[in-house]
Amino acid sequence: MSEMYIEEIKSLLPHRYPFLLVDRVLEIIPGESLTAIKNITVNEPQFPGHFPQQPIMPGVLMVEAMAQAAGILAFKTDNIVPGEDSTYYLAGVDKTRFKRPVVPGDQLRMEIKLLKSKRGIWVFEGKAYVDDQLAVTTELMCTVKG
C-alpha cells in the first residue's frame, strides 16, 4: 500500500495536537508491517522543559509514537473504521531500550511489525531510527476496546 498523509492518519487516530505523533506513513502492508515518520521540531511543547539547554525527545513520547503507528497498522489490518466501538489502547510495553538521543531536526523513522493478534490482543515489534542509527526498540501490546 502506498503512503498515507496526515488527513488519513487523523481519520484513524483520535489523537490531535500536541499528541498526534505520526506525521506520515511511508508504507503499510496490512497484517504485516508499517513504516512511518515523526518529524522532531524545536517548537514542540515538551522541549522548553525537556531540557531547556539541550532539548531531547522524551523516550515515552517515542514509544507513544510507535504505539500510534501500531494502531494504524491494526485498523488497516482489521479493515475497520475507528469509532466509539473500535478504539485501540496501549496495554503493555516490554523490552524497551533507548540507543541514542533524538533531538530537534531529527526525523524518527518507525518500523512496526505485527508479531501476533489473538482475541483482540495485538503484539507488535517496534524499532525507530534516525537516519540509519537505531534510536529505540520496544515490544508493544495493544487491545481493542468498545
Image: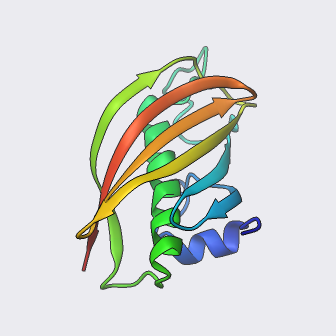
Place residue 24 in its image quadrant.
Answer: bottom right
Is 9 rendered above or below residue 37?
Answer: below
Is 44 rendered above or below residue 116?
Answer: above
Task: Residue 126: give x, y in percent of width and height.
Answer: 49, 41
Place residue 142 in its image quadrant.
Answer: bottom left
> Which of these two is toward me, 114 or 91?
114
Is 59 rendered above or below residue 45?
Answer: above
Its colouring scheme is rainbow
Is 10 rendered above or below residue 90?
Answer: below
> Which of these two is toward me, 117 or 19?
117
59 on left or right of 128: left
Quarter occupied by the C terminus:
bottom left
33 on left or right of 58: right
Task: Residue 67: give x, y in percent of width and height.
Answer: 44, 51
Task: Residue 30: give x, y in percent of width and height.
Answer: 56, 68
Residue at the spot 71% in from the left edge and 67% down from the top edge = 4
Residue at the spot 50% in from the left edge and 25% down from the top edge = 50
Residue at the spot 60% in from the left edge and 55% down from the top edge = 34
Residue at the spot 76% in from the left edge and 67% down from the top edge = 2
> Which of these two is toward me, 29 or 39?
29
Place residue 20 in its image quadrant.
Answer: bottom right
